[in-house]
């Protein structure tokens, strides 16, 4: 037996790149996870009052946490300083753990990927702002991906945050501008070598899917399920998306949360994972359109809130034999605009079988 095929993974383990993510951050029961994206640091941020009223146990920032759009580290640092000075954000940090990944505007450039020249400096500023220790393995990673586990055995929630920027290949532009796809300008990149995640991030992600947990909330700055809009999404890299769904076969209790779009929606597809793939998109915290906007196409949409500031909330009723999940989008007035319920057992392989959902009658 040879270990050569496992050499890349073993090398990552040796450097400690997995160590910090495989430990439980807190064994206190977690039943309410809030999240959001797209936060203008120069604007008012009343949404934090509604977040606090929802009493989440954890808050997740999914990217565009500031709008810096700069290659200048001094300007990027100043943008984060403005966010850090916001009273609502300060109260949030004192009340609960705050986890984060990034998107393009806090990464440095609109729709940027691996080509961003100052991405390493952006990463260190990001990690500094979110209080990551200088000796953390996260400082050595090719990106800001991270995971933590909350809750006691048997009721554990794992939050996995992906980095869809640091190693992303170029986007493919739609050349014919006469018939732009809804919401944007991008087409699928079918290059077999195109990447959204690096090889090391894929290896790390697979390792995280082996960590014991009953519910896995996977955060992506860009949408995972949507296939129809012309903006940024996993479907722009179909082979990477296929790989992502293939990994869902190896785990249970997984769902996605996302941001980026400046509107909120819940999408679901009978995906290639053996169970329903849910993607709850919350956007934005203070950067939304407040006038009516045309509805973009999304064949997998269950519900949508296409204007107004909002945040997402996942509630878990652990008191039931089959824990109940509630997916919610709450607006700046505290009203629940999207509410969808699903039992945790649904997020398991084989639940999409026609024979399993249609009553079986004797022949």
Image (tube, helix red, strand yellow):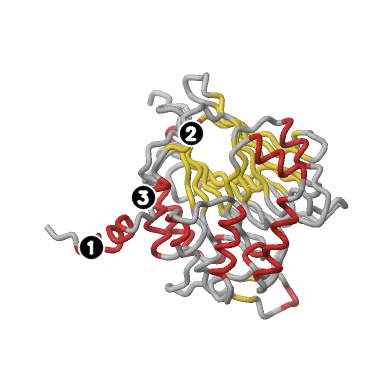
Instruction: Kindly tell me whether residue 276 is visible in this rendering.
Output: no
Q: Nearer the viewer, residue 123 or 251?
A: 123
Structural distance between the alpha carbons of marks 3 and 2:
20 Å
Whether residue 132 sits left or right of residue 339 in the image: it is left
Residue under the point 56% across and 76% down: 115
Front position among marks 2 and 1: 2
Does dot 1 land on a helix, a strand or a loop? helix
First in residue order: circle 3 vs circle 1: 1
Q: Quadrant of the C terminus?
A: top left
Q: Which residue is mark 3?
A: 207
Q: Which residue is mark 1?
A: 5
Does the CB distance between marks 2 and 1 fall below 8 Å?
no
Tell me residue 324's x, y (percent): 55, 27
Residue under the point 58% across and 56% down: 128
Q: Quadrant of residue 82?
A: bottom right
Q: Which residue is mark 2?
A: 26
Does the CB distance between marks 3 and 2 fall below 8 Å?
no
Structural distance between the alpha carbons of marks 2 and 1:
35 Å
Structural distance between the alpha carbons of marks 3 and 1:
16 Å
């Amino acid at each position: 037996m040879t270990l050569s095929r496992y050499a890349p993974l073993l090398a990552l383990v040796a450097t400690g790149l997995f160590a910090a993510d495989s430990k439980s951050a807190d064994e206190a029961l977690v039943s309410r996870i809030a999240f959001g994206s797209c936060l203008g640091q120069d604007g008012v941020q009343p949404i934090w009052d509604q977040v606090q009223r929802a009493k989440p146990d954890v808050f997740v920032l999914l990217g565009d946490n500031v709008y810096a759009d700069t290659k200048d580290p001094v300007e990027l640092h100043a943008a984060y300083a403005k966010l850090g000075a916001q009273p609502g954000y300060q109260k949030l940090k004192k009340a609960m753990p705050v986890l984060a990944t990034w998107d393009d505007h806090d990464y440095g450039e609109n729709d940027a990927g691996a080509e961003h020249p100052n991405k390493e400096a952006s990463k260190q500023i990001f990690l500094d702002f979110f209080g990551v220790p200088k000796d953390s393995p996260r400082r050595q990673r090719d990106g800001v991906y991270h995971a933590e586990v909350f809750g006691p055995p048997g009721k554990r929630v794992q939050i996995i945050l992906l980095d869809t920027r640091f190693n992303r290949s170029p986007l493919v532009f739609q050349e014919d501008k006469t018939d732009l796809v809804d919401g944007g300008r991008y087409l699928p990149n079918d290059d077999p070598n195109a990447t959204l995640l690096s090889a090391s991030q894929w290896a790390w992600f697979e390792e995280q899917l082996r960590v014991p947990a009953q519910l896995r909330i996977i955060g992506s700055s860009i949408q995972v399920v949507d296939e129809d809009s012309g903006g940024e999404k996993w479907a722009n890299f179909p082979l990477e998306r296929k790989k992502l769904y293939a990994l869902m076969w190896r785990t249970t209790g997984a769902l996605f949360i996302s941001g980026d779009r400046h509107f909120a929606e819940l999408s679901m597809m009978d995906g290639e994972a053996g169970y329903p793939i849910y993607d709850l998109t919350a956007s934005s915290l203070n950067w939304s359109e407040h006038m009516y906007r045309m509805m973009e196409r999304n064949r997998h949409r269950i519900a949508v809130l296409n204007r107004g500031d909002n945040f997402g909330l996942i509630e878990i009723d652990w008191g039931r034999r089959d824990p109940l999940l509630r997916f919610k989008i709450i607006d700046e007035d505290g009203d629940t605009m999207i509410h969808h319920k699903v039992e945790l057992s649904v997020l398991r392989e084989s639940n999409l079988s026609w024979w399993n959902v249609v009553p079986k009658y004797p022949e």
